[in-house]
Image: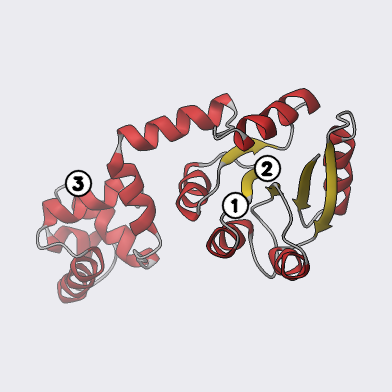
């Protein structure tokens, strides 16, 4: 028997996933949890599991944090992220945390079952759109770098406005006129921008801001 656990903060979705798995006689759902913390408590009592179907967006302890903790403590348990999201950041962070597969919740029962078997046999279950995004991330490591850095860059609305003006090649004086600021205030904003972006020139600042979709 394949011993499965489902973790999702939506009990209706847990029921829907259980229903999909009920078609397959060799699958048993050992337990379900509404968040990562609840799952860790249950694993502490009994970690005789083959695979966890894990949601990402959950209160208390989200799926990515939980995956990391489960993989550290119970490396034998396979984890498939089963989520409504296929955005690049979630995929990258889930893989980094140790997820073995990544499927979307709208998956049909047969594909879900095949994905579970594939993962338990050492493969990596991924639906096509996620597989394409994963390949893209691997082909463009700069995208991965951007995902890591994105959270660290926090510019104020005014700083973004100054950067946008700067990207048009305007002088400090013209930027000051456009934004109703004094040239010295513009200069101060630009100093802060350089510091936050960790750059030393106007060209570098504009380029990095564009790479991170700030402007």
What is the spatial separation of the Cα atoms under label 3 and label 1, in whole angstroms?
54 Å
Horizontal and vertical percent position of residue 179:
29, 63
**Hey, which quadrant is residue 24 in on the image?**
top right
**Quadrant occupied by the N terminus:** top right
Q: Which of marks 3 and 1 is nearer the N terminus?
A: 1
Q: How far apart are marks 1 and 2 (CA)?
A: 19 Å
Q: Is mark 1 on a helix, strand or loop?
A: loop
Query: Counting residues from the N terminus, which is met first, the one under dot 1 or under dot 2?
Result: 1
User: Few, some or many C-alpha atoms within 10 Å of disc 1 (few <14, some 14-19, many ≥20)?
Assistant: some
Which sits in the foreground, 71 or 18? Answer: 71
Q: Circle 2 — which element?
A: strand
Look at mark 1 in the image and give the residue it sits on. 76
Residue drawn where x is 60% and y is 28% of the image: 127
Residue 18 placement (x, y as % from top left) = 86, 41
The residue lying at 78 percent from left, 69 percent from top is: 45
Q: Residue 168 carries which label?
A: 3
Q: What's the residue at 29%, 41% (across, down)?
A: 141
- The reply to whether callout 1 and callout 2 are in contact (CB within 8 Å) is no
Does dot 3 land on a helix, a strand or a loop?
A: loop
């Amino acid at each position: 028997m394949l011993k499965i656990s489902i973790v999702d903060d939506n009990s209706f979705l847990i029921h829907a996933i259980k229903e999909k798995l009920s078609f397959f006689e060799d699958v048993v759902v050992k337990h379900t949890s509404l968040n990562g913390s609840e799952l860790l408590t249950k694993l502490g009592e009994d970690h005789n599991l083959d695979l966890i179907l894990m949601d990402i967006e959950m209160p208390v302890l989200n799926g990515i944090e939980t995956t990391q903790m489960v993989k550290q403590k119970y490396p034998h348990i396979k984890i498939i992220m089963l989520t409504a999201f296929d955005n690049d950041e979630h995929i990258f962070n889930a893989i980094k945390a140790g997820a073995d597969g990544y499927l979307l919740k709208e998956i049909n029962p047969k594909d879900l079952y095949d994905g579970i078997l594939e993962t338990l046999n050492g493969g990596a279950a991924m639906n096509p759109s996620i597989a394409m995004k994963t390949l893209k991330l691997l082909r463009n490591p700069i995208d991965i770098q951007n995902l890591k850095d994105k959270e660290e860059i926090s510019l104020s609305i005014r700083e973004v406005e100054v950067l946008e003006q700067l990207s048009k090649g305007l002088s400090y004086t013209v930027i000051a006129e456009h934004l109703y600021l004094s040239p010295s205030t513009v200069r101060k904003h630009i100093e802060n921008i350089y510091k936050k972006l960790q750059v030393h020139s106007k060209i570098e600042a504009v380029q990095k801001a564009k790479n991170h979709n700030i402007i």
